[in-house]
Image: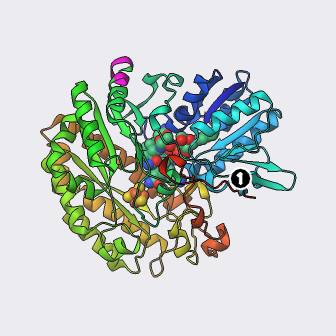
Amino acid sequence: MRICLLNPTHTAIGSRIPSDHLPPLGLLAVGGPLLDDGFAVRLVDADRAGLDARQTLVAVLAEPVDVVMMGHSGSSSAHRTVLNLALRLKRLHPRLIIVCGGVHPTYHWQETLAQCKAIDFVVRGEGERTTRDLLRLLDAGADWRQLPGIAWREADGPAASAKATMLECLDDWRVGWELIAHENYSYWGGMRAVVVQFSRGCPYLCSYCGQRGFWTRWRHRDPARFAAELARLHREHGVQLINFADELPTGSRKAWRAFLEALIAQNVPLTLVGSTRAGDIVRDADILHLYKRAGVIRFLLGIESYSQATLAAIRKGATQSEDREAIRLLRQHGILSMASCVVGFDERSDADFLRTLRHLRDYDPDQIQTLYATPHRWTPFYGEVARRRVLEPDTRKWDYKHQVLETPGVPAWRVFAWVKFIEVAVQLRPKALWRTFFNRDPDQAHAMRWYTAIGRKVWFHELAEFLFRRRHFQAPPALEDLAGSSMADEEESMAVGRARGRVVRLVAQR
Ligand code: B12
Ligand code: SF4
């Protein structure tokens, strides 16, 4: 069977504004096992090339193809684009089998299959094993209905098999790096780059998080083998920058330390960036010099809120003092910190925004990332805000950079004004400017200037969009009336296998 992996063009600023593009790791992870099974696989990365829908169809159909597999890391906001492309592809090539996967379709399999007759299968949860097994069965013309982890359409509507079990050993599954030309992918202002995963999942319980339940349990790769793979990517493909896709790469101090030491021993000049929890940085205060020696240049700290009450309400499991200390420790070790700031959890008045700004200045991160709370249906947060009004009708804009939920007591224009003001007030502080333009460390100077240049474009882009293109609902509906009831009971997308001492009950769901 001839398979085309398709990374659709994302409409979000994260894809459209930077000239750098990262490889689509999810599709490459699915592609590796398919290649090893002898399938003919190619990748069309429409997102990287910025192809419009018509150009994408031409690129996919330029060579003979039996199966198109679509998925996107910016999963929820890419979903409409995926559905649209599937319909157009099927119209041009009715015998094509279209499979989609990723986080959003995993949970929304019923409406995906009901709304889009062009999609034949949804792969639910981790893609590697299920996709390979599905393709084997399709290729052999065998029955696939008993295969765990898939959904499809029967005459009377969408149907799904039991949940697949999580992959127990991540090292058994390889990424299909040969599907890309490494010189096409960069990050951090032109550095040849890849996205990788040392671990999957996260044991914390933040109520708004759309990722932790997808992977079900935290697992990690073998530290030495993983370090060797990164070193090989550098030596054989000239990769310079490693972007960690992990939710929590530092989840085990022992494993993370072993990885850092193994990478230092490989002696490769790699630059590492990723996200983690502030608490892990504080825990690792005595080994942060290893982070630095291994090449870590920046960690995004998922701080999200600067109010202790909000941190408790969203079950962040963090404290203000720990968050502040993590930033201080990173700076002490010559590592940049980026602090996330999520608005829309529970602000009630302008005073709440002002307090966020004061705290942010006091925490003193090198960079900030402001986001809007976005309700994913499979998270507990969704149930908590089910009666809140929705301002944003276009789900392509449910991308964390547009206000989706109304803030009671503060009109949308003022929320927007606060967000833009917070960004300027934090990033234009004399300290931040000094670190950007007079930084004596050339790598940090490059990082700060690159970030400032992108930030400037994004800032003006968002302002123009808000002023001239933004359309909110005239009569905003309540979230659950618009998007359905909570699916938080389904949050863990996979079953835990026998190897962890639990017996899996396979229950077919309809
Ligand atoms: C790297 C990354 C990026 C990179 C994208 C690089 C790239 N080309 O993919 C950059 C920085 C450009 C980026 C931008 C954005 N991102 Co981003 N990003 C991530 C990050 C850190 C890792 C994604 C990843 O590679 N995961 C690892 C892979 C292996 O997992 P996966 O993609 O889910 O794939 C597995 C399965 O889902 C499945 N699968 C996936 N696809 C398919 C397809 C088929 C056919 C099948 C069968 C299976 C399958 O199999 C895979 C292997 O098991 C995640 C956070 C995280 N921890 O995951 C956020 C994340 C994906 N990003 C997010 C968002 C919102 C965005 C933006 C919209 C932000 C913005 N407003 O600009 C944009 C969208 C543009 C884009 N290109 O994605 C959200 C998405 C939330 C959601 N549910 O929709 C996440 C989860 C962050 C978060 N905190 O919640 N992002
Ligand atoms: S720490 Fe991050 S990845 Fe873990 S549950 Fe919270 S938001 Fe999700």
Q: Quadrant of residue 245?
A: top left
Q: Main secondary structure of the magenta part?
A: helix
Q: Which residues are magenta?
A: 232-236
What residue lies at 61% left-to-right and 28% top-to-bottom?
34
The front one of 166 and 241 is: 166
Residue 300: x, y in percent?
32, 51
Q: Residue at the top extreme?
A: 236
Rendered-image quadrant of the N terminus: top right
User: Residue 163: horizontal and vertical position, in percent?
Assistant: 63, 51
Quick check: 469 above or below 384? above
Judging from the image, what secondary structure is the residue with disc 1 in? helix
* Residue 17 visible within the image: no
Amino acid type assigned to the residue bearing label 1 in the image: Thr
Crowd around label 1: few <14 · some 14–19 · many ≥20 (10 Å)? many
Q: Which residue is mark 1?
A: 112
| Magenta span includes 233 | yes
